[in-house]
Image: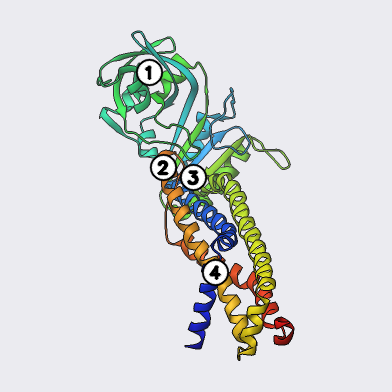
């Protein structure tokens, strides 16, 4: 009962000076609101990463022409991967599919007077199975298409919409580069890639048609591998690297002229990109809480100086040091907890607004609130101890003088 009475007295003291209480709460409000938004964006980013990794495929390995650290095929004419490399990779035990792909970006595609630009992928029939990417309507690339160098294509959802709008693209003719193609199918929509690009902005043609009729090249952009057992992913990736080192005559310290990427690499790279921003924003939120704690402590110290007669009177009437200490520490904790509640409400509101009106990945959960409670209690205790100790150590006679 005594503790409850002391706590009520502390809360009453806060209510008598509302403006001062607000200034003490301000830093906590800003810090908790920022922390809530940052954690919501972080959780949304994590969900986005896992969604995009699932698009990449948990049993997939990508062999990409050219060195470096990106996840996209080379922009220029990199000739370091060949059909012979793909054939050799197929012989590695544990591999279910190894399908070669040639590609070219920014290719003009026309349908009558309408034109757009897309990326053209020249593939073999097992490309669909390797990517688990099938035709939404029509037919997929067949072995006969590859054998006959057929001038047929499948359009992604983006060029199909750009060229034909609401009209079904199936059975229509398009001109890709200088070659006329029959649209034999439209691909399912896949959305964005792990790096945020539009995966649906593509046209898929037979590998031989692309390499001999359209691109006039004999090298590949990438080889998509699908392993039988996801537990063998890293081991098979190591074997692929060793095989290509041998075939390309690469010995240390020479740099690789290819990349081997797995789902784990994709997740690591995407998290690294988003993690830098999250770290910066979290640091700013922590700084706001720190500044708020310093402001809280200084205002409480000023409050102690102004309330010296009150403290002296309480001590004279039987108040103990720990009672005074408890009262001021209660005020500190009450300020930070009230600031936490207001800041959490603002943070949740801001997160909901970001989710509704922007493309930022936002996921609301209980974790920001739990961390806000812990942070507020820590700030209230740490920065409230010194003012509470100073108030408790005032001597009654000197305080009343």
- Spot occupied by residue 84 in the image (x, y as percentages of width and height): 52, 31
In the displayed structure, 158 sits above or below 34; it is: above
- Spot occupied by residue 145 in the image (x, y as percentages of width and height): 33, 22
In which image quadrant can residue 325 be found? bottom right
Is residue 197 at least partly visible in the picture?
yes
Residue at image mark 3:
92
The residue at the point 63 percent across, 79 percent down is 310
Residue at image mark 1:
149
* First reached walking from the N terminus: tag 3 or tag 1: 3
Distance, label 4 to label 1, CA atoms, is 82 Å
Residue at image mark 2:
55
Disc 4 crowd rating (10 Å Cα; few below 14, some 14-19, many 20+) is some
* First reached walking from the N terminus: tag 4 or tag 1: 4
Res 14 label: 4
- Spot occupied by residue 115 in the image (x, y as percentages of width and height): 40, 13
* First reached walking from the N terminus: tag 2 or tag 4: 4
């Amino acid at each position: 009962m005594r503790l409850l009475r002391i706590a009520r007295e502390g809360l009453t003291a806060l209510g008598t000076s509302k403006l001062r209480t607000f200034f003490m709460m301000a830093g906590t409000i800003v810090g908790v609101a920022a922390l809530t938004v940052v954690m919501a964006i972080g959780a949304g980013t994590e969900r986005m990463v896992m969604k995009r990794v699932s698009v990449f495929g948990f049993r997939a390995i990508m062999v990409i022409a050219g060195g470096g650290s990106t996840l996209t095929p080379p922009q220029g004419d990199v000739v370091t991967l060949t059909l012979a490399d793909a054939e050799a990779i197929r012989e590695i035990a544990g591999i279910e599919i190894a399908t070669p792909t040639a590609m070219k970006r920014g290719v003009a595609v026309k349908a009558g007077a309408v034109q757009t630009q897309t990326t053209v992928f020249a593939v073999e029939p097992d490309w669909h199975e390797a990517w688990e990417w099938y035709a939404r309507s029509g037919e997929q690339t067949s072995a006969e298409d590859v054998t006959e160098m057929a001038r047929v294509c499948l359009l992604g959802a983006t060029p199909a919409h750009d060229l034909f709008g609401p009209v079904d693209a199936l059975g229509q003719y398009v001109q890709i580069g200088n070659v006329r193609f029959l649209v034999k199918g439209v691909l399912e929509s896949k959305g964005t890639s792990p790096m945020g690009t539009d995966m649906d902005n593509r046209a898929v043609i037979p590998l031989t048609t692309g390499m001999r009729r359209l691109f006039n090249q004999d090298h590949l952009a990438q080889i998509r591998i699908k392993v039988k057992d996801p537990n063998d992913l890293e081991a098979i990736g190591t074997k692929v690297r060793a095989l290509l080192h041998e075939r390309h005559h690469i010995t240390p310290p020479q740099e690789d002229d290819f990349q081997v990427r797995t789902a784990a690499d994709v997740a690591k790279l995407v998290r690294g990109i988003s993690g830098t921003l999250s770290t910066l924003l979290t640091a700013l939120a922590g700084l706001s809480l720190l500044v708020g704690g310093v402001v809280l402590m200084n205002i409480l110290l000023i409050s102690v100086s102004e309330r010296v007669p009150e403290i002296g009177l309480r001590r004279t009437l039987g108040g103990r040091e720990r009672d005074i200490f408890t009262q001021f520490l209660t005020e500190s904790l009450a300020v930070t907890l009230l600031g936490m509640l207001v800041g959490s409400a603002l943070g949740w509101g801001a997160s909901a607004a970001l989710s509704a009106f922007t493309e930022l990945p936002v996921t609301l959960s209980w974790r920001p609130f739990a961390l806000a409670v812990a942070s507020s209690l820590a700030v209230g205790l740490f920065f409230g101890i010194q003012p509470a100790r100073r108030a408790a150590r005032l001597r009654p006679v000197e305080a009343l003088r």
